[in-house]
Amino acid sequence: MKKQSLIRGSIILGVAGILTRFLGLFFRWPLIMLIGDEGIGYYQMSYPLYMFFIAMASGVPVAISKMISEKNATNDIYGSFEVMKESAILMTIIGTGTTLALFFFAKPIVLFLKWDPKAYYSLIGISFAPIVISFVTIFRGFFQGLQNMTPSAISQIIEQIGRVIFGVGLAVFLLPRGIEYSAGGAAFGATAGAVLGGAYLYSNYKRVKKRYAIKKIKSNPEILNTILKIAIPISLGTTVSSIMNLIDSILVPQKLLDAGFTNVQSTVLYAQLTGKASVIVNIPLTLSMAICTSLIPIIAENFILKKQKGLKGKIDASMKMASVIAIPCTFGLFFLAEPVMKFIFPGRFEGIEILKYLSLTIPFIIITQTTTAILQGTGHYIKPVINLLIGCLIKIVLTWVLVPMQMFNIYGAVLASFGAYLTVSILNIMMMKFTLRVRLNLYEILIKPCYASSIMMLIVLISYNILYKNTISNGISCLTSIFLGMIVYIIMIIVFKVFNVEEIRDRFKRK
C-alpha cells in the first residue's frame, strides 16, 4: 500500500475533518433550533463522558499505528496483523465494559454528578456508542500505521453523515415527548454513525488482508503486552486531556449556581460554552489532530530507523504547520466572533463573548497536541502525561476559584482552559528541547505566521465592513471576507517564506 507524506496525509485528514465539522453543523444547528440551549445543555452533559471513554481507548489506535509503522519499516507484514488481532481482543473488553457501565449506571452517574435529571436520557442514548467505536478506532489505527490516511478520512465523513441523519431524525421523532427525549435521540446518532463508518473500514481491511494472503492469525501475548505498554501512557494523557472537558461538565454548572445563577441559567451558559463556542473552536483543532495523526507513525519510522535528519525535518514541519493553522484561526474567531456566531446559529447566537475569549486558547491547545504527538512518536510516553496532569490540576483550581465569582462566572472556565493549556505547551516545548535536542526557531515558526495573520485580518475586517454596508447580509459578508482572507493568507505565507515552494514540494514527496 502506497505511503503518504506528512503534509499529504495531514491534508487528507484535515479536509475530511473540516467536512466532518461542517456536517456536524447540520447536526448541531437543527438541534439548537429544535431544543434550544437548554436541550443542548442536557446533550452536552453526557457528551464528555462519551469522550472520556474515547480518551481511555485512544492509546490503542495510536499504539497500533506506531507498531504497524515500525513493523512495515522492517517488512514484518504478518506482525502487523498480529497487532490487529491482539488489539481487537483488548478493545472488545474495553468497549463492552464501558457500554454496560454507562447503560446500567446512568441514573447513579447523573445523581453523583448532580446533573439535571433530564440529562439521563442523553446518557442512555450515547451509552451504545463505545462498543461500536472500539472497532472503528482499531481499523483507523491500522490504516494510519500503513501511512494511508484515506480510509480513515472517508470513514469519518460516512460516520458523520450517519450521525446527522439518524441523530436529527430521532430528535425530531422524539420531540413531542419532551426536549430531554429529543436530546437522548440525538445522542444515539453517534452509535448509528459509527456503525456505518465501521462497516466501510472493515470492508477495506478485508481487502488488504486478502491482498497479503493472510488467513489464520495466531495469538501473540507478547504483542498484547507491547500494545498495553504503549497504549496505557498515551490513553492516560488523552484521558487527562478529556478530563478537562469533564471538569467543565461537572464543576461549571455547579459553580455557576454558587455564582447566583438558577439551574436553567447555569445549563444555558454551559451550553453556550460547550455546545456553541467550543464546537466552533474545535474546527481548527480538527486540522491540528490531522497533523498529529499523520505525524506519529512517520515520526516513529524515522526514530526506529535512526534517521535523525529526517526526524528533525518532520518536527520542524509539524510545528510550522501547527502555527500556520493556529494563529490565523485565533485572529479570525477573536475579531469575527459576532459575524461567525450569527452566521452559524442565526436567531440563537447568544455566547458571542464566550467564543471571542475561548478562541485565545486555540494556539496553546494545538501546540499541546502537536508536541505531545512528537514526544509519543519518539517513545516518550509518560512525560507529556505528567505535563497534562499538571495542566488538569491548574484547570480544576482555576475553575473552582473563578467560576463562582460573579465578575467572572462562565468566563472563569475560559480562563481556566487558557491557563491549563498555556502551562502544558511550555512544559512540552521544554521537554522536547532537553530530550530530543531540538531547537525551535521561534521567528520562523511563530513570528512570520503572526505577520501574515495580521495582514490577513486587516483585509478581512475591511472587506467585511464594506460588503456588509452594501449587501446588509451577514452570511454573504462573512463567507466572502473569510474566503478572501484565506487567499491573502496563503500569499502572505509565501511572501514571508514560512513555507517556500521547494520545501512544500519536498514535503509532499515520500523520502
Image: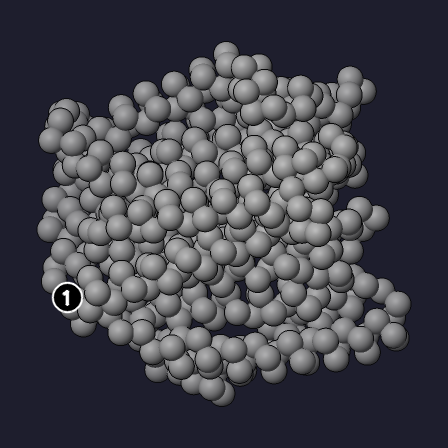
For this view, does 423 lie left or right of residue 48?
left
Residue drawn at (28%, 26%), measured in percent from left and top?
Answer: 90
Judged from the image, the secondary structure of the residue bearing numbered disc 1 is loop
- Taking depth in this image into account, of 217 and 268 the one nearest to the observer is 268
Up the image or down, 271 lies above or below 92; here it is below
The 10 Å Cα crowd at callout 1, few under 14, some 14 to 19, many 20 or more, is few
* Residue 262 x, y percent position in the rendering: 76, 32
Inspect the image, locate mark 1, and give the three-letter code of the amino acid beneath it: Lys
What is the residue that sits farthest to the top in this orientation?
A: 104
* Residue 387 x, y percent position in the rendering: 34, 51
* Residue 155 x, y percent position in the rendering: 46, 41
Up the image or down, 409 lies above or below 490; here it is above
For this view, does 69 lie left or right of residue 279?
left
* Residue 500 x, y percent position in the rendering: 40, 83
Residue drawn at (20%, 44%), measured in percent from left and top?
Answer: 67
The residue labelled by disc 1 is: 307
Q: Is residue 118 visible?
A: yes
- Taking depth in this image into account, of 357 and 2 the one nearest to the observer is 357
Up the image or down, 63 lies above or below 85; here it is below
Up the image or down, 357 lies above or below 401; here it is below
What is the residue that sits farthest to the bottom in this orientation?
A: 495
- Taking depth in this image into account, of 118 and 482 the one nearest to the observer is 118
Q: Quadrant of the C terminus?
A: bottom left
